[in-house]
Image (spheres, coloured by chain):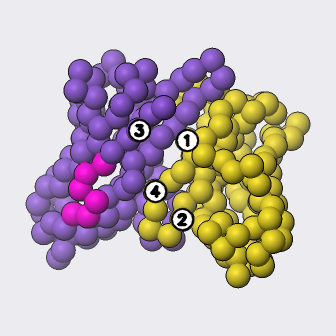
Amino acid sequence: GENVEQHPSTLSVQEGDSAVIKCTYSDSASNYFPWYKQELGKRPQLIIDIRSNVGEKKDQRIAVTLNKTAKHFSLHITETQPEDSAVYFCAARRIDNYGQNFVFGPGTRLSVLP
Amino acid sequence: DSGVTQTPKHLITATGQRVTLRCSPRSGDLSVYWYQQSLDQGLQFLIQYYNGEERAKGNILERFSAQQFPDLHSELNLSSLELGDSALYFCASSVGLAGEGEQFFGPGTRLTVL
């Protein structure tokens, strides 16, 4: 089955700096890769996603890149702000005859220091 | 607010007991997913239902079961509870079986087993 690894597990950056979180997946059939942000005690919220036919996607200060050959994708946050502090999860989705199966990475705890 | 509702918000029970968690998906969403998130852990996919039918199974224990009703709400039943079952249980919904990728998460049910 699919296995998603995520690094680093914790990341501290100074406000205004960039943050990069990397994920790798194992199943070449995975074709959709969302990123979720989860603040303490709250629900995960989708912040950006990318499909396998796209190499890069950007939304304001957030961007995601996908390398299908290497089976890895990354989240880039520029000009970080204290409110970016949260746990970030990557996920890989595979579709089979029965439905869609999401596998999440273990998460990265991002701390943005003022 | 994602439009996905979950009840109860908190649940405290004893080992060996059985509980039922309830989820109502967003209006129009046919797929429901259940996830378990233990303390400081990632999201573990448990099971997916689409329009009343089980469609995908993840790391769901035999002591756990779920169903989706004709009105599309879903229930997750946890029996013979153990201390290790204490976790945050999230429900998520999406429009389709596989074509629509984005999942919307509910606020979660925090289960504490004493």
Residue under label 4: B42
Q: Under tag 3, what secondary structure? A: loop
Asked if B39 appears above or below B61 in the picture, the reply is below
Amino acid type shown at disc 3: Asn
Check the residue under mark 3 and report the chain it is in: A
Q: Position of residue A51 (x, y in %)?
A: 38, 26
Chain seen in yellow: B
Q: Going by the picture, which residue comes out furthest to the bottom?
A: B114
Chain seen in purple: A
> Is residue A22 shown in magenta?
no
Q: Are marks 2 and 1 in contact (CB under 8 Å)?
A: no
Q: Position of residue B13 (x, y in %)?
A: 77, 77
Check the residue under mark 1 and report the chain it is in: B
Q: Which stretch is magenta?
A: A6-11
Amino acid type shown at disc 1: Gln
Task: Determine the residue positioned at 66% across, 48% down.
Answer: B60
Side of A10 where A99 appears, left or right: right
Q: Under tag 1, what secondary structure? A: loop
Q: What's the CA distance linking mark 3 and mark 4?
A: 13 Å
> Counting residues from the N terminus, which is met first, the one under dot 4 or under dot 1?
4
Label count reads: 4
Q: Are marks 4 and 2 on the same chain?
A: yes
Residue under label 2: B38
Side of A7 where B7 appears, left or right: right
Q: Are marks 1 and 3 on the same chain?
A: no
Main secondary structure type of the part rendered in magenta: strand
